[in-house]
Image (spheres, rainbow, N blue to C red):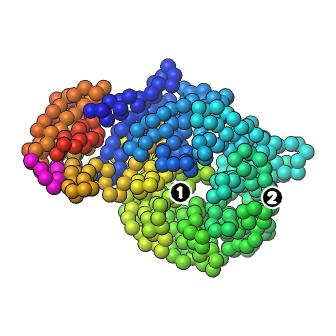
């Protein structure tokens, strides 16, 4: 009951229009908690201090965004408004030494560095680059993929931004800026790269930064842009020291068309290997590369059972990782295929499993991931935003996934196990409860409405097929508590009519 009351208290108001935060779905592998408001947006903050979950929250009723901390079960711990007008700061991206950081454009002509404390106060506000009419190169703010940056292991930031000549329509170069956590510029470089609206990603592998572009090359080669490849960049001098050229990044398909295999996202696996996520003719594949030999050492192509083409272009925030892992035997990434699918694989190229996150919502079909995190105990946390277009509306969720199961309880000392299944979900006239327990004699289920009122109570006398009549309940979401062997297992079920 305490857990239920805590869940209800997590509903929070930030203006005259109330925003709420509630668990809307749970099964044996994952749960989804929903933020509701006026066009809500959430993004996961990269937290390098501890295992606490931090998100940025914004909706149309707010003048400024909020930073929210949560425990590993997605219960809200604190919520703080960012003291920064006007509405230009919708999200913070990194938390280091209890400070929050954001790098972004302001008024289309200034690259800004900002730092905030735990109370939402702006303690550092610096211009990293201001467009000047006398400059030979400007910030290319016309592209939605014009900036990428990475927090490095030494707590420095590398920023890469597209630049253009005043009379040019596209990007003409990349500018690299290395800064510390005070916003001081430590080094900068400009490399020519003629391209138009081209995304780029960075990862840190051993002593190098890897950029999935090759700069300082001719614009065209055999009729194709010639920037595809991987550049090896020195982390201190920002000099390009080596590269993997075009070869491994192109295929010729049966029609004779040459297509790019350039990764949409890259991440270091260890000091010598890295992985790249690739969208290829409506499908996904993952290449694992050896940095030293410059070879593809493994290719992963997930099995598909879908009718629509997949989409992995669902996150233009390039400060966020598309891969997360605690150990290289269990690496996660995701893609959208009329729903959101988690793919788990190993560093040697084996697929461990893939799991499609499905729950009763039209929004999941057009879902955009705003950050992933893996906890110390191997659970995956995802911040997502969903859209429907007729009528247009937005919702946002935090999702928690555990491949070993969320609702199973095991006594470590005795090895005794308690696990339940409540189905169907959504239900109509009846819900059924199945029980798996080492020692079982009887149990009890209680159903509460979203105001916390007890609306149903029933005994559970069998391990399988316990039937609970919910035909007299109003349509809506209900929280259940199952009391079993002195423990309480909670979840949520939706009753429809």
Determine the residue positioned at 57% across, 63% down: 267
Q: Describe residue 170's horizontal placement relative to residue 207 as left or right.
A: right
Residue 155 percent location from the top left of the image: 66, 53
Q: Which residue is mark 1?
A: 322
- Can the viewer see residue 251? no
Determine the residue located farthest toward the top in the rendered image: 16
Q: Describe residue 90's horizontal placement relative to residue 111 as left or right.
A: left
Image: magenta residue range: 434-441
Determine the residue located farthest toward the front in the rendered image: 413
Residue 138 percent location from the top left of the image: 82, 48
Determine the residue positioned at 67% across, 39% down: 115
The earlier-in-sequence mark between 1 and 2 is 2
Q: Nearer the viewer, residue 52 or 243?
A: 52
Q: Which residue is mark 2?
A: 189
Report the number of discs. Answer: 2
Cα–Cα span, label 1 and label 2: 27 Å
Hey, which quadrant is residue 278 in on the image? bottom right
Q: Residues within 10 Å of mark 2 (few under 14, many from 20)?
A: few
For the C terminus, the image quarter is top left
Residue 231 to residue 110: above or below: below
Determine the residue positioned at 69% across, 52% down: 157
For the N terminus, the image quarter is top left
Please tell me whether mark 2 sits on a helix, a strand or a loop. strand
């Amino acid at each position: 009951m305490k857990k239920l009351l805590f869940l209800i208290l997590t509903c929070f108001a930030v203006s005259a229009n109330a925003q709420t935060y509630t668990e809307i779905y749970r099964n044996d592998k994952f749960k989804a908690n929903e933020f509701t408001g006026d066009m809500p947006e959430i993004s996961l903050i990269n937290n390098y201090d501890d295992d606490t979950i931090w998100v940025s929250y914004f909706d149309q009723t707010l003048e400024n965004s909020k930073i929210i901390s949560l425990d590993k079960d997605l219960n809200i711990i604190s919520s703080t408004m960012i003291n920064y007008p006007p509405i230009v700061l919708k999200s913070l991206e990194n938390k280091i030494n209890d400070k929050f950081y954001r790098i972004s454009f302001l008024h289309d002509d200034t690259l800004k560095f900002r730092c905030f404390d735990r109370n939402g106060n702006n303690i550092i506000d610096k211009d990293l680059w201001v467009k000047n009419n006398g400059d030979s190169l400007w910030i290319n703010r016309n592209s939605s993929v014009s900036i990428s940056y990475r927090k490095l292991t030494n707590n420095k930031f590398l920023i890469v931004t597209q630049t253009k000549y005043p009379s040019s329509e596209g990007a003409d170069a990349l500018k690299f800026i290395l800064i510390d956590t005070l916003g001081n510029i430590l080094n900068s470089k400009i490399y020519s790269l003629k391209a138009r609206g081209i995304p780029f990603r960075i990862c840190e592998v051993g002593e190098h930064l890897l950029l999935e572009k090759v700069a300082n090359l001719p614009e065209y080669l055999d009729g194709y842009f010639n920037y595809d490849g991987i550049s090896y960049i020195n982390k201190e001098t920002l000099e390009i020291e080596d590269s993997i050229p075009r070869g491994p990044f192109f295929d010729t398909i049966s029609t004779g068309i040459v297509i790019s295999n350039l990764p949409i996202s890259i991440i270091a696996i260890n000091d010598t290997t890295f992985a790249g996520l690739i969208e290829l003719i409506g499908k996904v594949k993952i290449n694992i590369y050896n940095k030293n030999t410059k070879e593809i050492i493994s290719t992963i192509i997930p099995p598909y059972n879908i009718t629509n083409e997949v989409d992995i272009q669902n996150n233009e925030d390039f400060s966020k990782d598309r891969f997360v892992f605690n150990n290289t035997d269990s690496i996660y990434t995701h893609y959208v295929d009329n729903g959101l699918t988690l793919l788990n694989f190993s560093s040697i190229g084996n697929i461990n499993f893939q799991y499609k996150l499905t729950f009763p919502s039209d929004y999941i079909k057009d879902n955009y991931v705003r950050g992933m995190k893996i906890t110390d105990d191997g659970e995956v946390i995802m911040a997502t935003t969903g859209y429907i277009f007729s009528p247009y509306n937005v919702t946002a969720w935090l999702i928690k996934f555990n491949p070993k199961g969320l609702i199973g309880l095991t006594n470590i000392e005795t090895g005794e196990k308690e696990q339940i299944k409540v189905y169907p979900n959504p239900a109509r006239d009846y819900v059924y409860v199945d029980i798996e327990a080492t020692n079982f004699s009887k149990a009890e289920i209680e159903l509460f409405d979203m105001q916390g009122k007890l609306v149903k109570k029933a005994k559970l006398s069998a391990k399988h097929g316990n039937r609970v009549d919910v035909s007299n309940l109003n349509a809506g979401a209900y929280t259940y508590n199952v009391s079993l062997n002195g423990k309480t297992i909670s979840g949520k079920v939706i009753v429809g009519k």
